């Protein structure tokens, strides 16, 4: 411990002079403790000294043991080397004798095999001269095995001589076999009873020879069989497209007639299979010449009949010989097109169909070695002949397009533009009938080809569907045009009856059905068509056409309803707003708007799908709100009582619009629609509040509630308030001096609406949202001016219509009115 600690310790032990008597005992105790510690240290040092000495002794003993072990290992290694040398000396003579024995054994075996080879070659020569094919076949196998043992002795003269002699014998056998087979098919097999047996044995010889001999023999046989075919069908009489069926009848009859004779060939040769391949190649070449050198376009009926018979023949070959063929499950695939689209939700209208590819179909024009392989090795008979028709099927697609267009015209002419009562679908019959016709056309074409012609037909389908979209678009009601319409103010307006509204809904549903079904059509075609063309199968352009029809139809529906509101909007301007004495119930024009919507909305809601009904409602709200706002300016003069009555009417119209989703029995997105309506109608409410404000604060109120207003609009408000030109001048000068708005808020993006709209502002519920930088007190002061100018009789009604529930009781706006 440090000095301070020792001092404190001493003072603690001896706080007084009397306690110093205990110093001596304490010193004795401390000395005793020191002696005990010193004794412990000494004992530890001695023990450590003894342990170090013992460790050195142990290390020295271990070192001596390692040295002894190394010495013993070297001694063992030396003895092992001596033993190995001794064993090699003992076995030296035995190894020489072993090598000598092995060489003698090899020599004896080689001489024995050489004797057998010489004897086998001589016997084979005799068999070849006597045409003993069966025995020669077995002997050939033996000689081939013996020759394989002498591959290492090719340079030995005797071996070279024997190999050359064996080669000549095989050449003799080959010439004999080819000579005998040349008589097959000439009628000699019926005259010589043993000829077929001899040829059957000759096949054994051919199998024993090189594989090229068998290929050459089979090719020669097939070429000889098809010589008469070429001579018959190259003549002027049968070298015609309408005689195509007789070609396939000839080969089938030939194979039936010679079926028993051709049993002489081993099944592993697949003679019939290879004969059919060569027949298909020759037939395709001749048909190509016929199609290419025709002076005029072939008759469609003749062309399709020839193609149909060709496809049937290819199917028979594919079924008989197997190979890489593709199943014909496309009929069920095509039948599913459009089957469930009439009840499908419209939210899938822009669905992107994932492309699925069919199994790869072999190219019929490829010339590969696998054509001569065994059946089932991947060769595809389908298309081997019929592919030559592909470049000439343009006339077929032209005929299909003409037929489809004629059927389309007929369907549109016969369309009643109505649906049968009790029908679960609200889709026009022409839409469903058109896709039935397209499915039948697709079935016909897919049965004939799955290559370029099918792709061309798909392009035809696109053009037909686009034409149908144009027909639907043309059926929509059009606005008034011409001098008379311009003179009467009806230019561009669309008048729609109840039937017209139903027709428009049917057109929307039909366009939606066509959009979804055309996507299914593209998906089915991509599964059927050759995989190289599948990427080009796309219906997005057609779907865009029908989507445009849907959009235009819904806009037309909104414009038709707008036209129905013309009388009510005109009635609103004829109300004497400047001379009203009291505020009553909602006006008659509001009841008229309500009646119009109540008669149309339930029908539209029952016919349109939820997503399109919601789109229609949004368009209607975005149109009617600004129009109602603009119609206020068309009134002559609005008194304070008139403004209060109009504010009541505005709230009634807003309530009517908010009730539209429930009228249409579709409330899935009613919340978002309610916000949209409130935003649009609040502009008219803000305008009426400005009209209600007193003269001395009208400019400030206008800037606060309608910050994006214009001087011309403000001047019109002054006129509505009944101010004379002279009284307006000073207010306008002050307004223009301070600018149209309190601040310059960021301009919103332009909106394509019939009339310009003002931003939605709610001074009472959210005073900070109007976009100006003035203090809250200034805004409330300006609003107070509006309150002081309000009539006592209409104040409570005005407050009930404009204030939120949380501000009615003790809000700042209410307090300002009471001030």
Image (cartoon, rainbow, N blue to C red):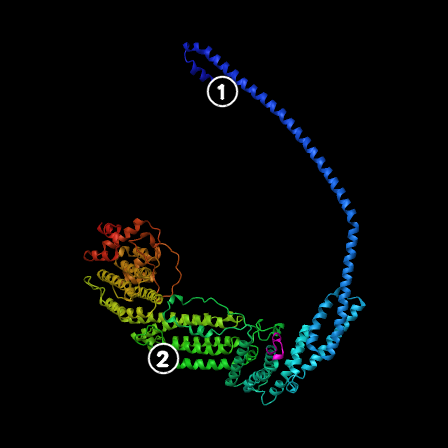
**Label 1 Cα crowd, 10 Å radius (few <14 / some 14-19 / many 20+):** few
The spot of residue 275 in percent (x, y) is 61, 79
Secondary-structure class at tag 2: loop
Q: Is the C-beta separation of discs 1 and 2 under 8 Å?
A: no
Q: Nearer the viewer, residue 689 or 512?
A: 512
| Main SS category, magenta section | helix
**Label 2 Cα crowd, 10 Å radius (few <14 / some 14-19 / many 20+):** some
Quarter of the image holding residue 704? bottom left
Apparent side of residue 809 relative to residue 14 in the rendered image (left or right): left
Q: Is residue 784 visible?
A: no
- Residue marked by disc 1: 2
| Mark positioned earlier in the residue sequence (1 or 2) | 1
Secondary-structure class at tag 1: loop
Q: Is residue 21 visible?
A: yes
Q: Which mark is residue 285?
A: none
Apparent side of residue 738 relative to residue 295 in the rendered image (left or right): left
Quarter of the image holding residue 177? bottom right
Compared to 733, does 606 lie above or below? Answer: below
- Residue marked by disc 2: 415
The spot of residue 63 in percent (x, y) is 67, 31
The spot of residue 630 in percent (x, y) is 31, 65
Compared to 5, does 111 lie above or below? Answer: below
Apparent side of residue 662 relative to residue 346 in the rendered image (left or right): left
The spot of residue 332 in percent (x, y) is 44, 73
Spatial separation of the CA atoms under disc 1 and disc 2: 116 Å
Q: Which residues are magenta?
A: 263-272
Residue 619 colored in magenta in the image:
no
């Amino acid at each position: 411990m440090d000095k301070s600690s020792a001092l404190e310790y001493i003072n603690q032990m001896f706080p007084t002079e009397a306690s110093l008597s205990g110093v001596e005992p304490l010193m004795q105790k401390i000395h005793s403790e020191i002696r005990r510690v010193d004794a412990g240290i000494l004992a530890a040092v001695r023990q450590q000294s003894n342990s170090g000495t013992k460790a050195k002794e142990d290390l020295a003993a271990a070192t001596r043991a390692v040295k002894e072990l190394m010495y013993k290992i070297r001694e063992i290694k030396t003895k092992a080397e001596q033993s190995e040398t001794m064993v090699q000396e003992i076995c030296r003579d035995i190894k020489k004798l072993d090598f000598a024995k092995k060489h003698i054994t090899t020599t004896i075996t080689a001489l024995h095999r050489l004797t057998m080879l010489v004897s086998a070659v001589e016997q084979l020569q005799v068999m070849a001269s006597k045409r003993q094919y069966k025995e020669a076949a077995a002997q050939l196998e033996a000689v081939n095995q013996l020759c394989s043992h002498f591959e290492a002795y090719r340079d030995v003269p005797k071996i070279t001589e024997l190999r050359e002699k064996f080669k000549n014998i095989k050449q003799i056998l080959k010439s004999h076999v080819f000579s005998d087979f040349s008589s097959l098919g000439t009628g000699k097999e019926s005259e010589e009873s043993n000829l077929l047996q001899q040829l059957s044995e000759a096949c054994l010889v051919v199998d024993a020879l090189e594989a090229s001999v068998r290929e050459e023999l089979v090719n020669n046989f097939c070429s000889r069989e098809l010589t008469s075919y070429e001579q018959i069908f190259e003549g002027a009489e049968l070298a015609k497209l309408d005689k195509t069926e007789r070609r396939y009848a000839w080969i089938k009859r030939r194979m039936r007639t010679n079926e028993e004779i051709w049993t002489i060939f081993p099944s592993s040769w697949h003679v019939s299979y290879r004969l059919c391949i060569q027949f298909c190649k020759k037939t395709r070449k001749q048909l190509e010449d016929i199609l290419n050198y025709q002076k005029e376009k072939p008759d469609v009926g003749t062309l399709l009949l020839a193609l149909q018979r060709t496809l049937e023949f290819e199917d028979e070959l594919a079924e008989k010989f197997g190979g890489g063929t593709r199943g014909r499950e496309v009929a069920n695939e095509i039948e599913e097109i459009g089957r469930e689209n009439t009840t499908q939700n419209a939210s899938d209208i822009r669905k992107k169909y994932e492309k699925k590819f069919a199994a790869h179909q072999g190219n019929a024009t490829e010339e590969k070695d696998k054509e001569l392989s065994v059946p089932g090795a991947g060769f595809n008979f389908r298309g081997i002949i019929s592919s030559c028709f592909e470049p000439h099927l343009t006339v077929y697609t032209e005929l299909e397009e003409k037929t489809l267009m004629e059927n389309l015209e007929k369907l549109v002419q016969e369309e009643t533009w109505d649906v049968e009562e009790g029908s679960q679908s609200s889709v026009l019959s022409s839409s469903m009938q058109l896709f039935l016709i397209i499915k039948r056309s697709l079935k016909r074409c897919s049965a004939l080809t799955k290559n370029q012609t099918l792709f061309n037909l798909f392009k035809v389908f696109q053009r037909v569907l686009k034409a149908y979209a144009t027909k639907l678009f043309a059926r929509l009601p059009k606005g008034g045009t011409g001098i008379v319409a311009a003179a009467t103010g009806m230019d561009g307006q669309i008048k729609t009856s109840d039937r017209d509204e139903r027709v428009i809904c049917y057109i929307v549903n039909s366009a939606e059905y066509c959009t979804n079904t055309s996507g299914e059509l593209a998906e089915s075609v991509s599964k059927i068509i050759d995989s190289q063309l599948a990427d080009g199968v796309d219906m997005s352009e057609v779907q865009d056409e029908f989507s445009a029809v849907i959009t235009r139809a819904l806009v037309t529906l909104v414009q038709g309803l707008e036209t129905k509101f013309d009388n009510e909007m005109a009635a609103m301007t004829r109300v004497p707003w400047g001379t009203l004495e009291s505020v009553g119930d909602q006006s008659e024009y509001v009841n008229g708007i309500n009646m119009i919507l109540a008669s149309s909305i339930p029908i539209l809601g029952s016919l349109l799908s939820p997503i399109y009904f919601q789109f229609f409602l949004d368009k209607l709200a975005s149109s009617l709100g600004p129009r109602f706002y603009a119609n206020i300016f068309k009134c002559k003069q609005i008194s304070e009582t008139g403004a209060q009555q109009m504010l009541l009417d505005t709230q009634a119209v807003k309530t009517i619009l908010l009730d539209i989703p429930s009228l249409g029995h579709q409330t899935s997105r009613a919340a978002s629609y309610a916000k949209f309506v409130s935003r649009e109608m609040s502009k008219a409410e803000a305008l009426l509040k400005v009209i209600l404000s007193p003269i001395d604060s009208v400019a400030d109120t206008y800037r606060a509630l309608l910050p994006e207003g214009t001087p011309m609009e403000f001047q019109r408000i002054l006129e509505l308030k009944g101010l004379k030109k002279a009284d307006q001048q000073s207010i306008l000068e002050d307004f223009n001096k301070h600018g149209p708005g309190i601040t310059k808020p960021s301009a919103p993006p332009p909106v394509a609406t019939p009339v310009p709209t003002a931003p939605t502002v709610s001074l009472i519920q959210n005073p900070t949202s109007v976009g100006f930088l003035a203090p809250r007190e200034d805004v409330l002061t300006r609003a107070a001016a509006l309150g002081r100018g309000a009539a006592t009789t209409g104040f409570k009604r005005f407050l009930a219509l404009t204030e939120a529930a949380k501000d009615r009781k003790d809000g700042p706006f209410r307090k300002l009115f009471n001030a």
